[in-house]
Image: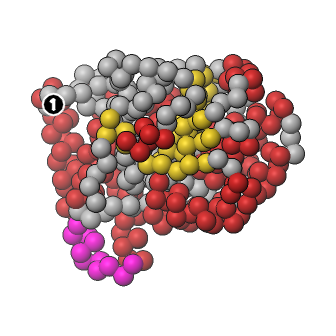
Amino acid sequence: MNPPTLSPFRLLKDPKTYVDSKLDLRTADEDRLYWVGFFQRHIHTLLKLAKEAGLARDLAVEDIDRRAGAALVEFDDLTNRFLAAPSAQPKKISIMTLDRWRDGILRKHGFVDCFIDLKDRENAKMLPLLPAVCAELDSMRGVEQIRAVVAGVFAGNIFDMGADATAKRFLSHSPDFFNTRAGLPVRPWLIDDFDWAERSLFEKSYAKCVFFIDNAGSDFLLGALPMVRWLAKRGTHVVIAANERPSLNDMTVHDVRNWWPRILEAEQSLATLPIELVSTGTGEPMIDLAEVSDELNQAAQGAELVILEGMGRGVETNLDAEFSCDALNIAMLKDARVAAHLGGRVFDLVCRFR
């Protein structure tokens, strides 16, 4: 299959001035050391999961170990060369660059979706809770309902296997969605445009929304999907935009499509709502809106609202992005370095509306 054609996201206010992130690791010395160190540690977690997935599929352990060793050597060599001579890189090096280096090397050595079994496990555990979450929201009205919808997105977003605060924590234990939701920080949040967002979501009848989703499990099924449902029940055509290629525990468009029949069986109200599934054409935990699929751009025509959910898409990239329509960035912060850049702490909440 040929890779999708990529072009700037049609809802950017000015694609010529758009930057996904201002952070350049060539010159940001402390950030460079922090992030390269994190990626060099974290790849061991990915390779451990890749080995478990391979063994579950009866692949030869010797071959898995050989490929994993080669991937680790290649990644360490590449990142150590960057550490030794950061200024030798001709273009900006961002956290997304490190993502692309890592995932490219893993794919080269045959590790395409290291988190596939973990994603499926979490989806299977969280799906039975979806009807209860939807029924709870349906029992509410007005402000109480939209506040519960947003709280659910925050709570679900804690399931993040690409952050120090949560990666090891959820390798063998699932997040407790309801306890997490009950224990969310009180307002005002670190970035808190909720009053404005609340008024706009209630007062405006959005014809179409593009919703960039994040992780599997509680994040998608108990956080993002109930918000998609809430919008769609109000008459908004919701375009669910998901990665084309696997990265960490992010839901790909293929994951969503594979799980969709089971989702509709669990929560039948979704079957009659105006919801569309499309590929972003991308394959990182963040997103560079300068390069998205033609499929997404076609689906986004006429959209009046963009939602960027999750720390990668909504904070590490695109927090300051300007759109030609309303936009909501919503995420829980799970990395101390990301939080510190915003003057906050791990598990602080971001709700930016513009």
Q: Is residue 124 above or below residue 179?
A: below
Asked if the magenta segment contains residue 63, the reply would be yes
**Image side of residue 81 versus residue 270, left or right:** left
Q: Residue 245, percent across and down?
A: 37, 53
Q: Is residue 263 above or below residue 335?
A: below
- Nearest the viewer among 214 and 44 is 214
Residue at the (59%, 61%) spot, across then down: 260
Give the residue pinned by disc 1. Answer: 89
Position of residue 34 in the picture relative to residue 348 (left or right): left
Give the total number of marks visible in the rendering.
1
Between 288 and 24, which is closer to the camera in this rendering?
Answer: 288
The crowd level at tag 1 (other Cα within 10 Å; few <14, some 14-19, many 20+) is few
**Magenta residues?**
57-68
In this rendered view, identify the residue nearer to me: 100 or 291. Answer: 291
Magenta includes 286?
Answer: no
Report the amino acid beneath label 1.
Gln
In this picture the colour scheme is secondary structure
Quarter holding the C terminus is top right
User: For residue 44, which quarter of the picture?
Assistant: bottom left
Q: Main secondary structure of the magenta part?
A: helix
The part of the image, by quadrant, that contains residue 128 is bottom right
200 with respect to 40 (left or right): right
The residue sitting at 65% across, 30% down in the picture is 206
Residue 87 in sight from this viewpoint = yes
Q: Is residue 280 above or below residue 208?
A: below
- Determine if residue 223 is in view: no
SS label for mark 1: loop
Up the image or down, 158 lies above or below 307; here it is below
Which corner quadrant holds the N terminus?
A: bottom left
Residue 273, image x, y percentages: 68, 50
